[in-house]
Amino acid sequence: MRSMCAGWDTPLREPLARSCVAPFRQAWKRYGKAAAATACSDRPAERSGREHGCDRVLDLTPCSRSACTRLQAQHPIYPRDESRLQTMRRNRMPPFWREDELNRISRRLFVGAAAGVAILGAAGRAHADAIQRGGTLAAALWPEPPMLVAALTSQDQTTMLSAKMLEGLVTYGYDMAPQPRLATAWETTPDGLSIRFSLRRGVKWHDGEDFTSADVAFTIVEILKAYHPLGRIIFSAVREVETPDSHTAVLRLAHPSPMIMASLAGFISPIVPKHIYASSDPLRNPANSAPIGTGPFRFREWQRGSAIIFERNPSYWDEGKPYVERLVYRVLGDSTTRSAALDAGEVILAGPNPVPYSELDRFRSNPHFTVELRGEELLMHMQALQINLRHPDLEKLAVRQAIYHAIDRDALIRAVWYGAGHASNSPIPYQAREMHADDLPSYPYDPARAQALLDAAGLSTGANGIRLKLRFDWVPLGQENLLTAQFIRQSLRRVGIDVDVRSFDLPTYIRRIYSDYDFDLNLMNYFPTSDPSVGVQRFYWSKAASRGTPFVNASGFSDPEVDRLLEEAAIENDPASRRELIHQFQHDVMTSLPILPLVDLDYVSIISKRAHAVMLRPEGIRDNFADVWIDP
Amino acid sequence: MSIPHLTFVGRRLLQAIPLLFAVVIFSFTILHLSQGDIADVMAGESGAASPAILRDIRHSFGLDQPAMTQLAELGSRVIRFNLGKSLRYDKPVTDVIFERTLPTLLLTTTSMFISLILGVACGAVAALNRGTIIDDAIFVISLITYATPMFWTGLLLIILFSARLDWLPTSGMTDAALETHGLSYVVDVLRHLLLPSVTLSTVHFAIYTRLMRASLLEVAGLDYVRTAQAKGLPRHRILIKHMLPTPLLPIVTMAGVQAGALLGGAVLVETVFAWPGLGRLTYEAVFQRDYPLLTGILILTSFLVVAVNIVIDIIYSVLDPRISIR
Amino acid sequence: MRGLFRRFCHKRSAVFGLALLLVVVLVAMLAPILYPVDAAEMIAPPLLWPGQSLSFPLGTDQLGRDIAAGLAEGARTALLIGIVSTGTAVSIGVVVGAFSGYYAGRFVESALMRVVELFQTMPQFILVLVVVALFSPSLVMTIIAIAAVSWPPVARLVRAEVMSLREREFVQAAVALGRRDSGIIFVEILPNCLAPIVATSSIMVASAILTEAGLSFLGFGDPNLVTWGSMIGEGRNDLRTAWYLVAEPGAALLLTVLSLGLVTEGLNDALNVRWLGHPLA
C-alpha cells in the first residue's frame, strides 16, 4: 500500500476557468478534508485579477501520504483513461463552463487524477530496479553548437554534447562534494599550494591510446588555461602541472585557489588527448568536430542542420556501461516543434528550456514526463540589468535605486517566465545556499519611492512627464528577453523614464556593449557557476574590465573595497572565512548597485518517464549519460 | 542544341560574370559594414570570453588584416573557383553548401511542382467557368492562400497534423533516430517533405492560378480560337492544343522569377519545420558573420538564377517561334 | 475618372474589397482616439480570453496588453509601412525604368538594367532580413529595406511600357518640336503608363505588409512598436494554450491583404490592364 503512494506529493494541476467553488465543495464532501485541503490553489488568480473571477488551479494533491492511503482504501483504483484526460485538457480552451458541466468533468477528473497520482507513484517505483540495456535515446537540441569539444568554449550545447565523449577529473554529487571520475583520489596540501591527483588506470582514448597524466598536464596548461573562457579564471593560479608518473598529476599553484576543485566537472574542464591536440592550432583542429575522448559514447556522425549521433563505447573504463546503445541529438529550431516532438515521443529528453514557458504546466500535468529543475546547480542562471556608470545621470546612486524600485520583479517573473524563477536580491542566486547572504538590502516594488528618489536626484518631470531618456539593450538570446525589455520599458515609463529599446543581433550587441560601451541599460543573462570567483567576480572586479571582451565588467564599476574582498575570497582556503568575505561582498554591491539583479531563473529539462537515471548528479543533462537507461 | 543556342548561352554566361563579381563585393561589404565578427559570435554564445581567445580566433581566420586585403584575398580565391573555408564550421564552403543543397532543391522543386500543377489546373477551371460561382470560389481561395502568412500556415499545420492527429512527423527531413536505407529512407523523407512543401507552395499556387486564368481569358477572345470553335473542333481539343500553349509562356517566366523568391520564402518554412536547407543556412551565415559562407551561398544562388533565366529564354524560343535567339 | 469608378463597381468583389480596406484605414486613423493609451501599456490582467471581459473584448496578451489596441496600432503601422515603402519603391522604379526605357540600347540603359538584375538575383527576403538586422531594426530601416527590394519589378514594368510607347507618333511629334528628353518622359509618356503602375502599387502594399509581418515574426521588427507580425511572433510561444494571440493579428493581416488583393483585381479589370508580369495580375 505504501509503495503505491510513493509519488503522492507530485501535484496534478488541472486548470479550470471559472470559480471552482462547486468542485471544492464536491471534493470536500466526497474525499473528506484531507484530500480537499489543497484542492484549490490561488496561483493563477493573481494573474487574472480577482475582479475577473477566480481562475483557479485545482491542485489534486492529497495533503498527506496517509490521506492518499485512505483515498485508495475508499475508492477502487481503475485504469486511468489517459487519452480522454488528454482530450479534456486540450479542450479546456473556452472560458465559459456551465456549473453542471464543470461538476461532471471535475468529478471524473478528481477520481481519475487521484487514482492517477497513486498509479504514477506505483509506476515510478516499479521500474526503479530493472535496468534495461540497449535502445536509442533521442534528444532535442537547439541551437546547433559550433563544435563538440567543451575545452575551448563554454557554449551551452557544446558542453552538453562534449560531456558524453570527453570527461573531467571529477564529478559531483548533490552535496557538491567531488566524486571520482578520471581521477580516483585527490589531495590538497594544507598550505593550499598544490593539489595531487591520482588518475584512474586502464582508461583508453577512443582511438585506443592510453590515458595518462601527460594528457591532464597538457589539457590544463595548454588548452583550458589558454583557451577556455572560464578556464583562464579557474586555472589562473596554476604555475605548472607535474607528472611524477603516468597516473599522477600534481598542480603547483602560485597561491591557494579553492575554485579549482569546484570546477572540474566534465562539461567545464574536460580532459583532451595530448596526442591529438599537441601538434596543431587547437581552434582549427578537426577533432573539434569529431572528438576523441575517454567517455562512454563515441562520436559517430554529424549531419549538419539535422542531427548529431553518438554510439556506445564498448571499451569504456566503467565496465558494463553505458547502457544505451545510441544517442541521437536532433536539431529542432522551433520551440513549438520541440514541444510537438516531445508529445509525439520523437524525442524523450530536451533541455534546457526546450518548450515555451507557457507549456510547462501542460508537461507538468502530463504523467509521461518529468519537468526537472535539477541539473543546473553547477551553473545556475541569472538575469540582471547592467548599468553604464559613465552616463552622468546613471552615476547617481539615487537614480539606480529608483530604477530598481520601479520594476515589479514578481510580476515580471509571472508574466514573462510563467513563474519559473525568483526575484533576486543578490548577484549570487538563492540556489547557492552557502554563499547566498540573507540579510541584504532590499528594494521592493515601490513606484512612489522611485519617483521620490528621482525628484531628489534633481530629475524633475519635463513637458510630457519625461524626466530622463535612456537606451535599453538586451542580449538577443531568447524571446523572453524581448518581453522583459518591453516590460521594463513600460515599468520605467510610469516613473517618467522614457526608454528606447534597441534590437541588435548578437555580434552587433557584443560590439556595442563591450567594445564601444555604447549603452545605458543592458539586460544580460549569465551563469554565476557554483563558485562566485569564477562566474560573479568578472562583473564586479575592476581588473576584469577589458574593452572588447564580452561578459565582463562593462559598467565602469571600480570600488577598492569590493576588489579587496573579491581578491581575498579567491585565495582563501578556509570555507568559513571565504563565506564571510563573499557575504560582505554581496552587502557592498547591493548597496552601491552597479548591476541590478533581477531574476534567479529556473532552467528546466523535460525528461520522458522512459528515460531513467538522468538526474543522478547535478551535472544532469550535461553529464556523460553512462548511467542512463531507457525503457524499450 | 544548335550553334545559335550555344552562342547565346555562352554570351549570357559571359554577361553574368560582372554580376557575380558584384555579388561578391556586395556580400563582403555588407558584412564588413556591420559590426561584430565571428569571434564576437563565438564569445557571445559561450557566455564568457577572454581577450587572448578573441585575438587568437581573429588571427586564425585572418580577420585582423585590413579590409581591402581580405577582399582581395577573397576575390582571388573566387576567381580560382575556391570558395574557401567556412569560419563557423571550419569546413570548405562548398562542402557545407552541398550538404544543404539537396534538401533545399527537394523542398523547392516539390513545392514548385505542387503549386504549378494545382495552379494551372485551378486557373484553367476558373477561366472555363468564368463568371460562375466556381470562378468566384477559386478566386477567394487563391486570395486567401496568398494573403495568409506562410509561417502561420506552417505552425497551424504542425499543430493539426503532427501534434493532434499524429499522421505526419513534426519536423526535420528524416527521423534520425531510425537508420533507414533504400526504399524506407525514401518513404521517410517523403513523409517529412509533405507539410513543408505544401506550406511553401501556398503563395505560389495563388499566383499561378491567377496568371493562368488571366492568360487563358486573354487567349479565349482571340481569333484563332474562335476559328477553331467555328470549325467544330471538340472543346478539350481546342483547350489542349490551341489554348494551353500560350499561357505557358508567362507561367514559365513567372516560375523563373519566383525561383529567387523561393529561397527567401524558404527561410521561414525551414525555420518552422527545422528543414536543413540553404535558406536557413544563409540566415545563419549572416548572423554569424561567416562571410566566406555567405559569399559562397550568394554566388551559387545568383548563378542558379542566371542559369534558370537562360533556360527560360531557351524554352521561350522553343515555345514561341516568333521569338528568336539574338 | 467617373467611368473608371463605374467600371470598378461592376465587380462585387472589388467593391467588397474596397469597403474592407476603408474599414482598415478608418481603424488606423481613429486608433489614437479609440485607444488613447499606448498599445504597449500593460494595463490589464494578462491572458484574458476574448469575450472574457467587456473592457477588453479581444482579450489581452501575456504581458497584459490590450489586443484590440494592438490591432489598431498595428493597422496604423502596417498601412504606414505599406504606403511609404511602396511609394518610395514606385518613385525609384518609375525614374529608373523610364530612363532606361527611353534610352534603350545605350549605355545608361544597360548599366541600370545590370543594377536591376543584381537586386533581382539576390533572394529578396534574405536581403531585407540582412539589411534590417544588420543596421538595427527600426521603422525607418524596415521601410528603406522593403523599398530597396521592391523597386526592380516596377522598373522593369515601366521600362517595357516606355519602350513600347517611345515609337508612337505623339512622342515623335514632341521630339520634332524640340522638347527636352526629361520633359518628354515625364509629361508625354509616363501619364500613359499610369494604369499598370497603379495596379501594381496596390499589390505591392500588400506584399510590403506581409514582408514586415515576416520580419517582425522573426524578431527583427522595431521593438518599440506593436505590429501585427510582432504580435504573432510573441504569441507563438503560447500557441497551444492561448492561440487567440496568434489568430487575431493573423486574421487582421489576412483581411487587409485580402482587401488589397480584391481592390487590385478590380483596378486591373477597370483599367483594362493586361498581364503585367507580376503576381495577381
Image: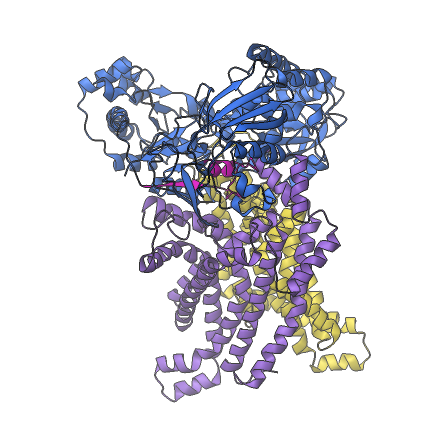
The chain coloured purple is B
Magenta stretch: residue B80 in it?
no
State the residue lying farthest toward the front.
A245
Q: Can you tell which chain is drawn blue?
A: A
Q: How many marks?
A: 0
Q: Nearer the viewer, residue A266 or B236?
A: A266
- Quick check: A557 above or below C166? above
- Compared with C242, C114 (above or below) is below
Is residue A220 shown above or below B110? above
Residue segment shown in magenta: A135-163
Colour convention of the picture: by chain
| Picture coordinates of residue A628, whole percent (x, y) | 36, 33
| Residue situated furthest right in the rendering | C178
Please tell me which residue is depicted at 45% across the width and 18% down the height of the picture: A175
What is the display colour for chain C? yellow
- Quick check: A305 left or right of B166? right
Examine the rendered structure and indicate whether residue A461 appears above or below residue B246.
above
Dividing the picture into quadrants, the one containing residue C273 is bottom right
Whole-percent x, y for residue B183 in the image: 32, 60
Residue B184: % across, % down: 31, 57
Q: Is residue A140 magenta?
A: yes
Question: Quick one: A144 or A603, which is closer to the camera?
Answer: A144
Which image quarter holds the N terminus of chain C? Answer: bottom right
Residue A192: x %, y % from top left: 59, 16
Question: Can see residue C128?
Answer: yes
Toward the viewer: A510 or A414?
A510
Q: Is residue A230 among what the camera can see?
A: no
Q: Quadrant of residue B325?
A: bottom right
> Residue furthest toward the bottom?
B231
